[in-house]
Image: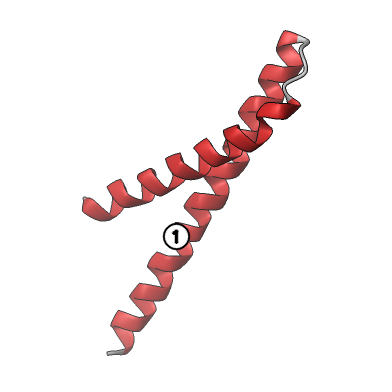
Amino acid sequence: MKVKKAEKKRNEGLTLISVIGGGVAGWTVNAVLSISSDSDMTHLYGISIFLGVIVGLLWDIADKLN
């Protein structure tokens, strides 16, 4: 019983890490593109963070299916 609870908490923690990591990766990609292209992309930060979170969730789902 305790093993299942510990495993569930671990999986929830990994999901949170995937979501946060995806958001940070999306923000980083947008920041790098903004700097390298010398254009203002601040209006795209929300979209890039959202897409990063989606990628993080998909990564987590794919990991759980394997």
- x and y percent of residue 11 in the render? 38, 66
User: Is residue 13 left or right of 8 when viewed as pictured?
Assistant: right
Q: Is residue 22 above or below residue 9?
A: above
Q: Amino acid at mark 1?
A: Leu
Q: Residue furthest top?
A: 37
Image-quadrant location for residue 56: top left
In front: 10, or 46? 46
For label 1, the residue is 14
Q: Secondary structure at mark 1?
A: helix
Callout 1: few (<14), some (14-19), or many (20+) C-alpha neighbours within 10 Å? few
Q: Is residue 58 above or below residue 36?
A: below
Query: Going 59% across and 34% down the picture, which residue do you hit?
Result: 47
Query: Going 28% across and 55% down the picture, which residue do you hit?
Result: 64
Image-quadrant location for residue 27: top right
- x and y percent of residue 2 in the render? 33, 88
- x and y percent of residue 9 in the render? 42, 74
User: Is residue 29 left or right of 17 when viewed as pictured?
Assistant: right
